[in-house]
Amino acid sequence: MMISRWIKATLLGLLSAIALSSCQGIIQAQTTEVPQIVQGILSDPKTFNYALNQESPNIFGLTYAGLVLENPLTGEIEPELAESWEIADDNLSITFTLRDGLKWSDGEPLTVDDVIFTYRDIYLNDEIPTDARDILRVGEARGLPTIEKVDEKRIRFTVPEPFAPFLGTTSLPILPAHVLRESVETKDSGGQPLFLRKWGVDTPTEEIIGNGAYKLAGYSTSQRVIYERNPYYWKYQQEAANEIEGEPIERIIWQVVESQDTSLLQFRSGGLDSISVSPEYFSLLKQEESRSNFKIYNGGPAYGTTFLGFNLNKASRNGQPLVDPIKSRWFNNLNFRKAIAYGIDRQKMIDNTFRGLGEAQNSPISRQSPFFWDGVEGYDYNPDKARELLTEAGFQYNSAGQLLDEDGNRVRFTLLTNAGNKTREAMGAQIKQDLSQIGIQVDFNAIAFSVLVDKLSNSLDWDAHILGFTGGNEPNGGANLWNTEGGLHFFNQQPPPGETPLEGREVADWEQEISDLYVDAASELDLEKRKEIYADIQRITQDNLPLVFLVNPLSLSAVRDRVQGVEYSALGGAFWNTDQLRVTP
């Protein structure tokens, strides 16, 4: 799932508002005369290279633009770097016309050649392992679009067969050829493009060239990311009089602190201009809203998903199974996964952890998406049903009520999540307690996000986790999660290119069916027929439970009154139009 203005399935909830690392830092940041806002992030960015990014938080929503963008208020595709486009009658090609006078943040011209380079040399380049390629694949043959230069202002994209999300995929960021081309064309001693090591987080920020509303101006590991207004952003070049009170936001500061409690403390003390309102903080903040000069925005059901996922990968690496074969037999038993779903009291989770500010989640597709199917069925809490399913699958209970498999092995597994996310930590603690009631011992462990990502992407040696993914209106943004060869097909993941290959990986029939249906849905141009296909996907997903979906919270953010012009939406949050916002002293 792509992050940025093209809504990506990448890991959800990691860009939550966190506080400054010290009160002194807050005072220094806010006494400056430069109009700015201070936000927070739960962990550091992992790369400054968009093509290699899989995580959130990331810098790209502020620093890059694509040919088009999705309006978070309307869901409509609107012009961005392209001023217009024309779709051919056969729906197989789109011709874009670029705006006049586009420039990069270093002042160099942004041209048609940059667009050609970005797609042909990076996104469509098999030597570069980018998730962007997954959402560009078309049809059963998984063909890729071609791109050609029509003239100095126009570019034409062509697909091998009709592709419903075609226009939306062109919201992928355009990257600078004059800075990156050499690294793509030059290989290291192992034959890999130097681009794979380009623009890591150790790169001086002045070397990172973008085309978005802001540019990187500073980065200190585990402390802060600083952005400054990009004077060459096309909207600023065409900026008209703004009737909103205040000054344009010249600087944005992201502070890194791995604690939601500190986030709350610093927001209440005035150190942060916004905070993602987690359920446990809602009542307190609501009481303070009017007298503390901030507003809580409610966008309705949040986009994205939160779930418990099991490692279903049966493969080995260098002769060693990724997952203990005993546990792997449990995880790959459908009755076991259904028992887990019945064994989790999601209503208690809603009432306690989410303070009633959410609802049970039963679908991989966001509730606000037009493709969400109301008929999707869930798994209500029913421990008796869970025990019945386990018994049918050959499990048994000892005299102490502990669950054993048919060989007498105690059923026990490790459940991971990212440390610092109090909501997920509370969910994990409850799941541990709930599953103990059906005889299962869960060893719950919150670990550093970087360690968790390495397990999911590289070592692949994990039992189960609680995570989430961002979502959007267009389900094909999640193709890289559900395609069996996708870069985020983490519950049965292939290793990334260059890593030691796996032996004995198996793909289940239902798993392949979901993957094929995503292809069918993207190829279908009739909206109602697309909805039917996505309804089938949601049904099959719930029937087979590769992921046990948990709770869909409300999208809530608190923003200081000094920030003017906020148009809040669950899809874009409070700052999707930062370039148009204003701040008062």
Image (tube, grey):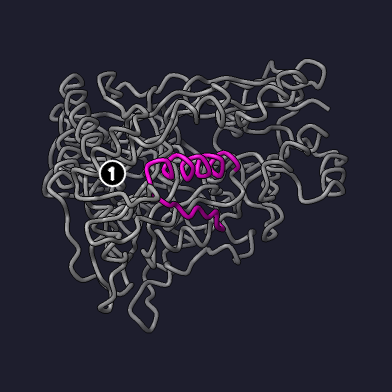
Which element is circle 1 on?
A: helix
Can you give x and y, in whole percent of width and height, for residue 13 in the image? Answer: 52, 40
Residue 84 at least partly seen: no
Q: Is residue 483 left or right of residue 347?
A: left
Vertical placement of 2 versus 44: above or below? above
> Who's the residue at 36% across and 63% down the image?
460
Q: Nearer the viewer, residue 577 or 386?
A: 386
Asked whether 585 falls inside the magenta stretch, the response is: no
Q: Name the residue carrying label 1.
A: 337
**Of 537 and 63, the residue lying toward us:** 537
Would you say residue 430 sits in the magenta stretch? yes
Q: How many marks on residues?
A: 1
Horizontal side, residue 61 vs residue 455: left or right:
right
Q: Residue at position x 42%, y 67% from top?
A: 196
Question: Which stretch is magenta?
Answer: 422-448
Q: Where does residue 197 sit, x and y in percent of width and height?
A: 47, 69
x, y percentage for residue 282?
66, 25
- Amino acid type, callout 1: Arg
